Amino acid sequence: MEALTTPTQTLIDDTTRWKEEDLLQLVKHFHRLNQDTEQYDRVKEYTLTIPSEVLQQIQADALEVTSFQLRMGIKKYTKINGAVGKNPNKTHFTFAPKLEIKFGSSEKNKTEEVILLEFEPVTEITPRFQSGQVPYEYKRAVTTNWEEIDNTLIDDLFIVRDPADNQVKRVEFFWVDKTGRTFINDVCDLNQPISLYMGVDMNKFHSKSEVSFTPVFGFTKKPQLAEGFRMMGVIETRGDRVFLEYSSPCPSTCPQE
């Protein structure tokens, strides 16, 4: 398997740091100290753009998405020697999710290729549910839940009882199944930025066997698609935006394909 973007040691360290973070300490990584207001802001949205040279190679080789995973990570900022001011780990969002995409083909003699990229937090303050950017229904509900949930409950959003061994574990990544990947290939313009919205499904909150943190992916729709395209439960649309609402956590539901 060829790595189109080589995972750096920093990216690897970030995922390890997530796995090893102490209990009840995750909450601080989703907040930053706003130095203007002296209050803590909670992160709501992330974004990334796949490098154009990567997409050019993928398109030249006629490859498509065969795996799409959101990997959890925690970034550590180092204060520059002699610098004054507040700890940079307090003034930055240190939750650092990664997107791992594998590309392949059904044709023989074509190798699978993988990219691993880091999402960046969207720090600009924008009106909630701005027209043309945020859909109604499911996504609005889960993102509102994320904004409003108490700090003391955030760690609980990422733990689950793994049926494989009946142990309580922290989720390591979310993955999109074949149906979701088909829609990414057929519907989504990967030349445009990909958004990650933070969400919580409160219907799962009291279940020990389900992860209640619910990521929602936002894409720009391919321009040739009809405006009325829609598949409830998997995809929501609004204007030129499409939203992938369903992914599975590992643990407890790890990919078998």
Image (cartoon, grey):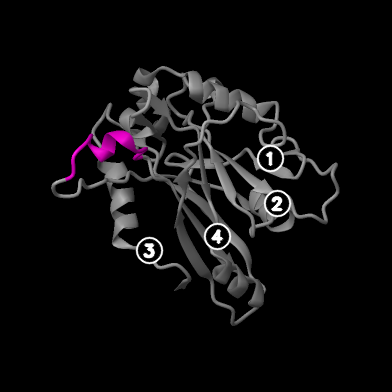
Q: Are marks 3 and 1 in contact (CB under 8 Å)?
A: no
> Looking at the rendering, in which quadrant would you find the C terminus?
bottom right
Residue 91, image x, y percentages: 31, 35
The CA span between labels 4 and 2 is: 18 Å
Specify start and end residues of the magenta stretch as a single range: 83-94
- Disc 2 target residue: 183
* Disc ID at residue 19: none
- How packed mark 4 is, by other alpha carbons closer than 10 Å (few <14, some 14-19, many 20 or more), is some
| Amino acid bearing label 3 | Pro
Relative side of 82 to 62, left or right? left
- How packed mark 3 is, by other alpha carbons closer than 10 Å (few <14, some 14-19, many 20 or more), is some
Q: Are marks 3 and 4 in contact (CB under 8 Å)?
A: no
| Amino acid bearing label 4 | Ile
The tag earlier along the polypeptide, 1 or 4, is 4
- Looking at the image, which residue is at 33% across and 43% down? 74
- Disc 1 target residue: 234
| Amino acid bearing label 1 | Val
Residue 214, image x, y percentages: 53, 33
Eyeballing the image, is 146 above or below 117?
above
The CA span between labels 3 and 1 is: 30 Å
Is residue 181 part of the magenta span, yes or no? Answer: no
Relative side of 91 to 44, left or right? left
Is residue 87 part of the magenta span, yes or no? Answer: yes
- Disc 3 target residue: 7
